[in-house]
Image (cartoon, rainbow, N blue to C red):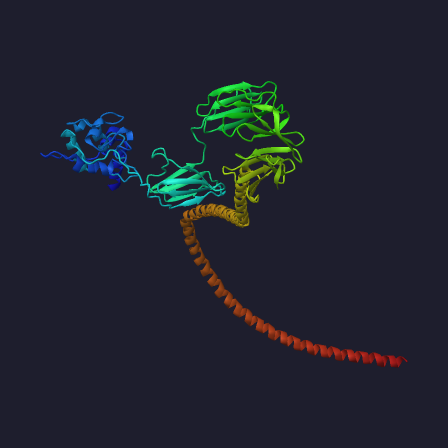
Amino acid sequence: MRRFLHFLLFAAISFTPLSVVNVLAELEVAELSRKEEVDFASEILPIFRKNCLACHNSKDADADLNLETPVSIGLGGESGAMVVPGNADESQLMYHIRQNKKPFMPPRRNKVGANSLTPYQLGLIKLWINQGAKGEVKNVAEKFNWQPVPLSMAPIYSATISSDGQFAACSRGNQIFIYHLPTQQLVTRLSDPALGEKIAHRDLVQSLSFSPDGKILASGGFRLVKLWANSFDENARIINIMTGNESLIGMDADYESDIAVVAGSAGGIQAVRLETGMPIWSDHISNTAGKRVIKSPDGKSVAVLFSDGRVRTWEVDTGTRITRESSPIKSTVFAWLDNDRIVSAHKGGIVKLWMSNNPGRTLFEWKAASEVSALLSKKNSETVFVGQVDGAVHIVNLNLGKTVKVINHGELVSGLKLNRDENQLITTGGVIAKLWDTEKWSIVGQFKGDPIIDESVHLAEQDLAFVKAEVLFHNSTVEEKQKQLKNDKDAYKKAQDTLAAHKKTVVDKVNEKTDSELALVKLNGEIKELPKRVEKAEKEKISIKELLNTAEQRVGKSKNNLINIKKELKASALEKEALVKSLIKLGAAADNASSLANASQLEAGKAKG
């Protein structure tokens, strides 16, 4: 009977129309009746806060529906009005929370711990809607007004260094500072655009860490982690300065005046406003190409070395030519000594000093020991640094007209540069850069190679070390895996053998079953024949009894015959014994007769003789 009831229940569920199933899925709604109005803030809002506001609030309004206040509820969502004041039965909100219309609210499977509403809660919401869906919520802040961290609160809670040793980051309050370690300079302060300029977190930054490649910095604040990428400024613009197919060869920019002067591969000269990228003036020197552009110390003039060996100068603001074709020819490098004078190097190691507005007159000439490859002047001084192809750097005092100091870079000198205070000189050439103290002329530091390449090599070595470690780890497990593979193969073979044995056993069992079935058939046949055999045996039993009686009679008769035979045998034995005795006697008589015969023959022979 119970199984029958279960079947009826299954059949009823399986073959019930879909509409009936939906009705069965609806949640029960309690019918509440009371005179006082339902208070939204104290009665309805707690229900929504526990089961609905996680997804339907002013910050995160799923489906554009905010259930925080009667006003926001009245605005509805993306599917229209959610409540019809005074008519709960026609309100979409009731359809969803009763779960008779999808989407069911709250979802039956959710990650915020929201539960389906109870009959009383549903009845209370229904009553509130029927009463007009009114009410107000006090002290609900639409937006938090975060207060900034005081500037005086700037503890350093965390610091970190990139794996390549190029950058360091530290926190001060809610700010993050990035430093370039080789130059010991502040690079930047990180800014979150949503918080303001140079503000990284809303709260104090308490942890920092670079990624292994140093390209990403992770910062941790209160319940928040941010990732910062080392990338180019998104506001940077790429502008095409040169016209036509001309390539840019040289450039010098004066950031104070916001003007850059560039020289091209076809002899073009152009001044450009850095802020806008718009050209100020342009000029062109035919049949030659620009090689190097250098502005004067005051930024008012610019000198350009061309491939024809001449140095030509212009006024930066107007583009007016200062030096024309009368400048010294076959110049290889040049430098401004001051705002009016230019020093240039020529073939044969000749160094000349001349006025930019009167290039035809040489003010000073000096011959170096070898070809000159770099020139640099010291401001407010008559000192010129002359770099040579033999690796020597001559410090020449023009007032004295001679070399006052020689330092050795070691390779062809390709560049010379003074720091802002002019108390340090850096010489470059080959793969080496040397930093010199200009007072003691001692080497402060020496740099070899290309930092970018070195960093790339370092990262590649890190990757190689990781790969080697991975290979070593995996190699260490190969033998173990091979042993395990062998064991697995042995186990597989054993399993195959066992399976084959089981299959054979099954075949044997099947054969045994077949034999047993045949034997059973035979036995059943014998059982069927058993009554006949019993009947036959009964008949045979009677015959056997008759035969037994006959045999017993015969045995009795045989016994009597045996007795008679024994008697006859005994009589025969007696007769035999008597006969033997007679034969013995006859033999003795025969022997005697033979002896007598022999004696007679002997006597007869004797008689004849």
Q: Position of residue 324 (x, y in %)?
A: 58, 20
Relative to 503, residue 49 above or below:
above
Report the residue at 66% width, 29% height from top.
Answer: 347
Q: Please tell me which residue lies in front, 374 or 119.
A: 374
> Looking at the picture, does residue 29 appear above or below residue 209?
above
Camera sees residue 311: no
Q: On the picture, is 54 further left or further right than 562?
A: left
Task: Report if residue 302 is visible in the image.
Answer: yes
For the C terminus, which image quadrant?
A: bottom right
Which residue is depicted at the point 45% across and 60% down? 548
Q: In the displayed structure, does residue 352 sit left or right of residue 503?
A: right
Residue 42 image-quadrant placement? top left
Quarter holding residue 134? top left
The quarter of the rendered structure image containing the N terminus is: top left
Using the rendered view, name the quadrant where residue 201 is placed: top left
Residue drawn at the location 61% of the way across and 74% of the way down: 575
Judging depth in this view, the residue of 277 and 491 nearest the camera is: 277
Q: Give the x, y percent position of residue 115.
A: 25, 39
**Is residue 466 depicted above or below 375 in this figure?**
below
155 or 429, which is in the foreground?
429
Number of marks drawn: 0
Along the viewing direction, whichever of 538 and 371 lies nearer the viewer: 371
Residue 306 lies, with reference to residue 512, above or below; the image says above
Of all residues, the one furthest to the right in this rendering is: 609
- Of all residues, the one furthest to the front in this rendering is 399
Task: List x then y, in percent, for residue 133.
Answer: 16, 30
Judged from this view, the residue extending furthest toward the left is 35
- At 37% from the left and 40% from the top, the residue drawn is 175
